Amino acid sequence: MANETDGDFSARIIAWQLENGRHHLPWQGDNPYYVWLSEIMLQQTQVVKVIDYFNRFIEAFPTLTDLASADEQSVMALWSGLGYYNRARNLHKAARCCVEKHHGQLPDNMTDLMALPGIGRTTAAAIMSLAFNRPEPILDGNVKRVLARYFKVTGEPNSGPTLKKLWQLAEQQQTSENPRAYSQGLMDLGATLCTKHRPKCTLCPLHSDCLAYQDDVIKHYPEKKKKPKVKAVDLYLYLGFAQNKPELVKRDDTGIWSKMWFLPEFESKKALRQSYPDSQHLASIQHVLTHRRLTMHIFIDGNDKARQKPIQRDNLLTLPHPSALTHILDYYDNHHLP
DNA sequence: TGTCCACGTCT
DNA sequence: AAGACGTGGAC
């Protein structure tokens, strides 16, 4: 369904990418494991921070087989602070699937890739095009923004009908000429020029044919997302110490921070006092997630007088833990006078 | 400072 | 369809 203009779209992006795109990120190249890991990390974190996490991860688990052989706890520990911990669990599970079913390699077709936990169409297509240089359309957040503006696609960005339109456009523009450069270029363009705020349209190789630019309505594309409702939740947490290290427990396997190590949590102040009658309230700290506003009520041992500072944290290096734990310990170090 | 927002998969 | 899932950067 490609016409003359469509061919130009991909040609311009490839030319722009070869000249202006990123070429030296640590995961770029034909290693599917690197591409996969980077795609999962990049879904939730910016490039600068991903570079550190990526390098540490690869150092610990240099190959897919190494990852499959690792235990889940050590994988999760290296993910601490990144958030969305189910993505790390799926990564680990998928690595084991690859060893069992695919000779320790990532498959090079969409069906088998999408059968792996945590890999949907977008991630599978990124692996296909970036690692295997195969012509498979991608549609991540950057590409959605580029297409929505270029073609003036209306509708809520993540609604079924809008996604269908965007995937169709992505398929129509797909080229078999240098698919790796095309996919990388589309994403780089969205990340560096076609940004949400203050896009640099005059530098964009597409601007002469961009419908939203022509009509001076870039601001209105893509449409805004509906905002999720945020529920307020109170957590009652006990901060105790042994040898100057925080006492941690492993959370159960449902809900927020499942199976991560954190402070013992209670349903109420009363329940906490039943277990720790001498505890005293230290502070109540706000911690906001996408869908929850947590108020963490921190209680410490009332006899906790001559505590050394700072708290020893070396046990945290090997234990998967959420950033909220770091925040609480930082608060203690900064406010609790011995 | 608070408020808004990104991001793809699974259920 | 719509909500769960975490963190931190940008405004």
Image (tube, coloured by chain):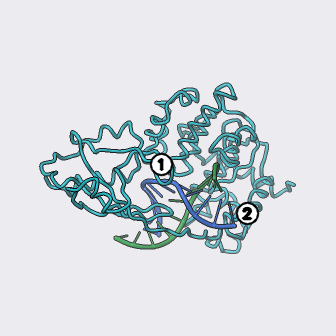
Chain colours: A cyan, B green, C blue
Q: Where is residue A209 in the image (x, y as percent from the top left)?
A: 74, 64
Q: Name the residue under label 2.
A: A160
Q: Which of marks 1 and 2 is in front?
A: 1
Q: Position of residue A207 (x, y in %)?
A: 68, 63
Q: How many labels does the image show?
A: 2
Mark 1 chain: A
- Earlier in the chain: of badge 1 and badge 2, it is 2
The residue positioned farthest toward the top in the image shown? A103
Of residues A306 and A329, the one nearer the viewer is: A306
State whether residue A15 is above or below residue A92: below
The amino acid marked with disc number 2 is Gly
Question: Under tag 1, what secondary structure?
Answer: loop
State whether residue A28 is above or below residue A251: above
For label 2, the crowd category at 10 Å Cα-Cα, with few meaning under 14, some 14 to 19 and many 20 or more, is few
Q: Position of residue A217 (x, y in %)?
A: 66, 74
Q: Do labels 1 and 2 share a chain?
A: yes
Q: Distance between the residues labelled 1 and 2?
A: 30 Å
Residue pictured at 75% horizontal, 56% vertical: A167
Q: Mark 1 points at which residue?
A: A258
The amino acid marked with disc number 1 is Ser
**Horizontal side of residue A205 vs A251, given as left or right:** right
Residue pictured at 50% horizontal, 54% vertical: A255
Q: Where is residue A1 in the image (x, y as percent from the top left)?
A: 87, 55
